[in-house]
Image (cartoon, rainbow, N blue to C red):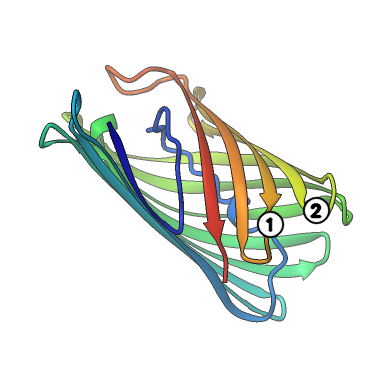
Amino acid sequence: MRKSFIALLFNLIVCVPGFAINNIENERLAPVKNGLSGQFQASIDGKSGNSEKESFDIGAKGIFKSGPHRALMIASREYGTSFDQTNTDSDFFHFRYVKLHRPSWASEYFVQNQSNPFKRLSQRSLVGYGGRFNLRDKEDVKLILGTGVFFLHEKIAQENAEEFWRANFYFVYKHNLNDQINLLNTLYLQPRMNEFSDLEALNDFSLNIKLSNTINLKLALKTTHDRKPPVGVAKTDYSYRTSFIYSF
C-alpha cells in the first residue's frame, strides 16, 4: 500500500542523480519582473507494508531584478529512510549575480555548496565567473551559450580533499510550442583544467505545460556522466521526474 502527502509539489522519482553538476539554467529562463519573486516546493512521500520508506524534499528559489542587475538564490534539501535506516541525505545551495552589459551578453559570478554522502560526496564548494551570450532571443526560440571557469574544493568520502579548476560550458535551447507548452534542453560540459579527460557532463531535457496562472506541470529527463567518478559510483546516471510547480 502506497501513501502520499502532497504539499505544493508532487514528484514521481525513479532514480535520484548523485553527480556534481546542477542545472541552474532551467531556474532562470522565465521572464522576471523588477523586484523580488520566487518559488517554494515541498513533498513528502511514503510506503508501508512490504516496504517501509519515507522521504521528503524541500526547495526554494528567489530572484531579484533591478535594471541590469540580477541575483538568483536556490536552496534544496532531501532526506529519506528505508526501514528506519537513512538512505537519502543531500543538500544544495547556489547564489549567482549577473550583470547585463548588452541585450546579447552578460557577466556572471557565482558560489555553490552541496553534499550527498550516499554518493560519497562529503562536500563540494566552488566559486566562479563567466560570460553568457544570447545567440538567438526570439519569443518562440532562445539559444544561449555560456562559458567560464570555477575553483573547486571537493571532498570525497574516504579520500583526501582536492582543490582545482574546471572549465564550464553550457548550451541552452528553449522552444515555446504555444502559449501553454514549451520544451527546454540544457547541456553542460565541465572538464578539469589540468586534465581534460576528467570530464563531467549533464544533459537536462524538460517539457513544461501551463495549467493555470500559478500552476505548471513539468516532465523532465536528466542524464549525467562523469568519466572519472569515485570508486563504487557508476559513470552514467539517469532520472526522470514529474512535478507540479506553484509560482508566486
Residue topped by disc 1: 29
Contact? badges 1 and 2 (CB < 8 Å): no
Q: Under tag 1, what secondary structure?
A: loop
Nearest the camera: 238 or 123?
Answer: 238
Judge whether residue 10 can be spotted in this image: yes
Residue at horizontal 66%, vertical 62%?
Answer: 107
Please name the amino acid that badge 2 sits on. Asn
Q: Position of residue 81 (x, y in %)?
A: 19, 38
Nearest the camera: 213 or 142?
Answer: 213
Tell me the quarter of the picture where residue 53 sits: top left
The quadrant of the rendering that contains the N terminus is top left
Q: Under tag 2, what secondary structure?
A: strand
Residue topped by disc 2: 134
Disc 1 to disc 2, how far (Cα)?
Answer: 12 Å
Residue at horizontal 42%, vertical 34%?
Answer: 13
Nearest the camera: 55 or 144?
Answer: 55
| Label 2 Cα crowd, 10 Å radius (few <14 / some 14-19 / many 20+) | some
